[in-house]
Image (spheres, rainbow, N blue to C red):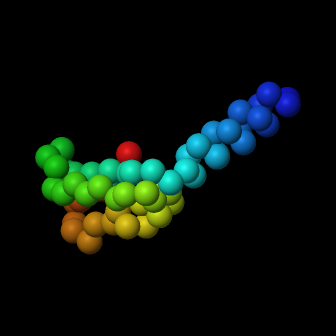
Amino acid sequence: MKKLVLISIIFIGLSSCKKDRVCTCTNQDGSIAAQATYINVTKKEAKTYCVSSGQGVTCTVK
């Protein structure tokens, strides 16, 4: 049980680290609509910036 808690804490800590994140937006057919790089941001911040207003466009943060 202690190992699971420790692994969870490490995972959460590493995923919230500030680093460069890439936002990729793709059309329904799979082609890339847009791509942007955010420097020194957390994953939550990058998800906030990585939004599309276009119909049929899906954006993801890596």
Name the residue at 16% across, 49% down.
32
Q: Nearer the viewer, residue 31 or 38?
A: 38
As displayed, is residue 18 above or below residue 55? above
Locate residue 58 relative to residue 31 in the image: left or right.
right
Q: Please indicate, yes or no, whether residue 41 appears anywhere in the rendered image.
A: yes
As displayed, is residue 34 above or below residue 10? below
Quadrant occupied by the N terminus? top right
Q: Nearer the viewer, residue 48 or 20?
A: 20
Residue 4 appears at what percent x and percent y? Answer: 77, 31
Name the residue at 79% across, 37% down.
5
Q: Check the image and name the residue furthest to the right.
A: 2
Q: Check the image and name the residue furthest to the bottom.
A: 53
Q: Nearer the viewer, residue 19 or 25?
A: 19
Quadrant occupied by the C terminus? top left
Q: Nearer the viewer, residue 31 or 2?
A: 2
Name the residue at 43% across, 67% down.
48
Residue 19 appears at what percent x and percent y? Answer: 45, 51
Q: What is the total number of numbered labels drawn onto the structure image?
A: 0
Residue 28 appears at what percent x and percent y? Answer: 19, 51
Name the residue at 38% across, 51% down.
21
Residue 46 appears at what percent x and percent y? Answer: 42, 60
Q: Please indicate, yes or no, whether residue 61 appears anywhere in the rendered image.
A: no
